[in-house]
Image (cartoon, grey):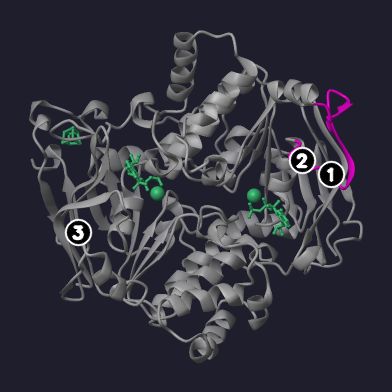
């Protein structure tokens, strides 16, 4: 196992109480596994990614742990994490492209980043250039300002940078959502290539585009309201999902060629619960067609196959 | 209602604006009442730039943007205000629309100050709550929070809710669904669908071709700042004539077909050339179907 996360609980402190953005999250990631991570907006995907990299000031590690390559990640200890960050675990954050300082050339930005990590730009430059060429960028881009690169070029640039030190785990948070479909494809295929070349061992690819991540992922994990509801091989999750939320989410994906005038797409009625004082029991209860008495208790995570788990009372029987 | 005629836009980039980048080249199209026009195309092809010009955030370098026949470059404050009562926008990258040091719902206050100064507190709150609910947000979960306390999709939907507070005629929606899960996307699209039936015109910039097909009657495909193909959605997506359009459609990820199963042959495309030159002219290839001559 490259990564093992056990009962991870990370809350946001607010004046009104704790927002339980990760409320008992457990999963494993095998060596070389590319896992897609999806779920409703606000369910905790970015929080999960950040928890494995850097807790911001308001995040509180309440319980559980994460083990990377056999060693525990010191999640709550920012200093200790600093030694692991970028080297062992790296992230491409949501909106990293628009976060690039527009007044600094890309080469300068890169040098700043490496210096902050105690690495030498001069020494790493040949490898950097080699990898840029691999993703179709010339050394020339180091002399460009971020605004001069297209979205796809910028995203490939960010991918090369974030994996330059060959981290074991890469978290890619919505890296394709701002790109056109051709560039989405190129970026997704680059992720696979990076794994093949050993630039990174395993990956968590956070996305809302299930049909895209299905193209490249070995497994897919679905979250709902701070918890994991299902994880399994990509084919199983797309073609034979078991959890009612996963089923509803997959059904909400548009078929190619559908028109508003002909037939309405149907969303999942209702809203997810608030994560400040969430209700007990299954969090999908209010929206679930199969909900029954038992669902007021927390459903167990049921192993349906060695690599397929769903947390729902209905899959128990 | 909205009309762009031979619009060009160049930016100055680099140290002291030493370089020029032509982002939009000779673009003409119109959006009618009750019509959703989708704009799709390459990243960096000028889609957001068009949206910004329609919203008067930047002026065109050449050409005209008109609303009901009147040019929209309003100089007077009162004209601008009148314009924004009719036209609102929601932008890609929701984070940039918020000021991190203020609570996120401050974006609503500006609308109240400008357009509803007389409304009672409770009535205003009710209006905001209804708008939030219509985009699938629980008011209690998002109000009185700072931007960093909300997820990308929540911030995005608050901006949509803000745009819908006013009874507008035209909405510029730039990638408003990319940050949302599949179910919430449908809610937002069906909401746009309902509003369009009541007469709203929408300039809908998106990367999701299936959803563009779902919601829009007409579509524009852009590359290198220019239109390569446009027309009725069914025609353009059903019978794409430009090689770029065909490549784009072939890249759409599908659930029943993996990229790795059927290696698609991509066609060679013209490289980016002199952006100052006129782009290839559009030729009519059918009823409401135009395509740029491919070299
Ligand atoms: N600093 C914070 N304080 C309080 N609540 C927060 C904070 N940051 C995030 N949250 C809440 O935690 C929940 C999880 O947020 P997160 O950003 O992880 O969601 P997400 O799954 O990545 O959503 P999206 O798909 O929209 O990006 C959300 O409900 C959000 O409102
Ligand atoms: N303020 C600016 N100054 C200089 N150049 C700019 C500015 N804004 C955009 N550009 C450039 O203009 C071109 C068009 O950008 P625009 O944002 O309109 O593209 P887009 O089609 O919306 O792309 P995406 O799909 O990535 O959002 C790009 O090359 C971009 O780098
Ligand atoms: S546990 Fe109950 S409410 Fe939850 S998904 Fe299963 S059946 Fe539905
Ligand atoms: Mg997120
Ligand atoms: Mg854009």
Q: Quadrant of ligand 2?
A: bottom right
Q: CA distance from mark 1 to mark 2?
A: 6 Å
Is B58 a magenta residue? yes
Tell which subunit mark 3 falls on. Answer: A
Residue at x 31%, y 52% (from the top left corner)? A57
* Left/right of residue B103 with respect to residue A283 in the rendered view: right
Tag 1 residue: B60
CB of mark 1 within 8 Å of CB of mark 2? yes
Question: Residue A124, relative to residue B136: is it above or below?
Answer: below
Residue B118, position as x, y percentages in the image: 59, 8
When the figure is inspected, residue B149 is found, relative to residue B271, above or below; the finding is above
Q: Are marks 2 and 3 in contact (CB under 8 Å)?
A: no
Tell me the SS state at disc 2: helix
The one of B85 and A4 positioned closer to us in this rendering:
B85
Provide residue A181's location: percent of width, then percent of height: 58, 56
**Callout 1 environment at 10 Å: few (<14), some (14 to 19), or many (20+)?**
many
Q: Is residue A183 above or below residue A69?
A: above
Same chain check for tags 1 and 3: no
Q: Secondary structure at mark 3?
A: strand
Give the chain of mark 2. B
Residue denoted by label 3: A27
Would residue A158 be counted in the magenta stretch? Answer: no
Q: Chain of mark 1?
A: B
Q: Residues within 10 Å of mark 3 (few under 14, many from 20)?
A: some
Picture coordinates of residue B221, whole percent (x, y): 72, 49
Q: Earlier in the sequence, mark 1 or mark 2?
A: 2
Quadrant where the image shows the C terminus of chain A: top left
Q: Quadrant of residue B14?
A: bottom right
Q: Main secondary structure of the magenta part?
A: loop
User: Quick one: SS at disc 1?
Assistant: loop
Give the residue pinned by disc 2: B53
Magenta range = B56-76
């Amino acid at each position: 196992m490259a990564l093992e996360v056990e009962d991870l609980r990370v809350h946001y402190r607010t004046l009104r109480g704790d927002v339980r953005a990760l409320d008992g999250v457990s999963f494993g990631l095998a060596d070389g596994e590319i896992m897609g991570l999806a779920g409703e907006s606000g369910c905790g995907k970015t929080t999960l990614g950040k928890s494995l990299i850097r807790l911001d000031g308001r995040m509180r590690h309440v319980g559980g742990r994460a083990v990377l390559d056999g060693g525990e990640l010191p999640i709550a200890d920012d200093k200790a994490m600093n030694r692991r960050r970028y080297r062992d675990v790296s992230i491409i954050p949501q909106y990293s492209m628009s976060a690039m300082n527009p007044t600094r050339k890309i080469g300068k930005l890169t040098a700043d980043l490496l210096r902050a990590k105690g690495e030498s730009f001069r020494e790493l430059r040949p490898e950097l250039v080699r990898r840029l060429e691999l993703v179709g960028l010339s050394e020339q881009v180091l002399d460009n300002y971020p605004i001069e690169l297209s979205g796809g070029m910028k995203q490939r640039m960010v991918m090369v940078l974030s994996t330059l030190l060959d981290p074991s785990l890469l978290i890619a948070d919505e890296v394709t959502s701002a790109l056109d479909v051709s560039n989405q494809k190129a970026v997704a295929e680059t992720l696979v290539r990076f794994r093949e070349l050993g630039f990174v061992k395993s990956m968590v690819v956070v996305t809302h585009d299930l049909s895209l991540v299905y193209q490249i992922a070995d497994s897919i994990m679905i979250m709902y309201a701070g918890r994991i509801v299902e994880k399994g091989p990509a084919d199983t999750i797309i073609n034979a999902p078991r959890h009612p939320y996963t089923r509803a989410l997959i059904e909400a994906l548009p078929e190619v060629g559908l028109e508003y005038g002909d037939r309405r797409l149907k969303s999942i009625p209702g809203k997810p619960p608030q994560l400040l004082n969430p209700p007990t029991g299954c969090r999908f209860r209010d929206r679930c067609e199969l909900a029954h008495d038992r669902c007021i208790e927390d459903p167990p995570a049921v192993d349906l196959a060695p690599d397929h788990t769903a947390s729902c009372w209905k899959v128990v029987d | 209602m909205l009309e762009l005629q031979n619009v060009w836009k160049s930016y100055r980039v680099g140290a002291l604006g030493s370089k020029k980048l032509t982002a939009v080249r000779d673009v003409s199209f119109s959006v009618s009442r009750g019509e959703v026009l989708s704009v799709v195309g390459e990243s960096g092809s000028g889609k957001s730039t068009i949206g910004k010009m329609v919203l008067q955030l930047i002026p065109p370098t050449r050409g005209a943007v008109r609303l009901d026949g009147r040019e929209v470059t309003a100089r007077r404050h009162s004209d601008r205000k009148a314009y924004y009562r009719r036209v609102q926008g929601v932008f890609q990258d929701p984070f940039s629309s918020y000021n991190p040091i203020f609570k996120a719902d401050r974006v609503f206050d500006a609308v109240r100050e400008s357009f509803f100064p007389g409304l009672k507190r409770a009535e205003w709150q009710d209006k905001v709550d209804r708008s939030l609910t219509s985009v699938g947000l629980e008011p209690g979960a998002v109000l009185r929070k700072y931007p960093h306390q909300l997820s990308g999709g929540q911030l995005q939907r608050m901006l949509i809710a803000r745009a819908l507070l006013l009874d507008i005629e035209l909405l510029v929606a730039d990638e408003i669904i990319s940050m949302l899960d599949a179910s919430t996307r449908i809610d937002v699209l069906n909401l746009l669908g309902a509003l369009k039936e009541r007469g709203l015109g929408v300039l809908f910039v998106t990367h999701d071709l299936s959803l563009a097909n779902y919601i829009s009657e007409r579509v524009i495909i852009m590359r290198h700042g220019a239109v390569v193909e446009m027309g009725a959605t069914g025609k353009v997506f059903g019978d794409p004539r430009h090689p770029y359009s065909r490549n784009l459609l072939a890249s759409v990820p599908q659930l029943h077909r993996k990229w790795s199963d059927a290696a698609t042959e991509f066609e060679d495309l013209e490289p980016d050339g002199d952006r100052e030159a006129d782009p290839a002219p559009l030729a009519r290839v059918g009823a409401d179907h135009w395509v740029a001559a491919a070299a």
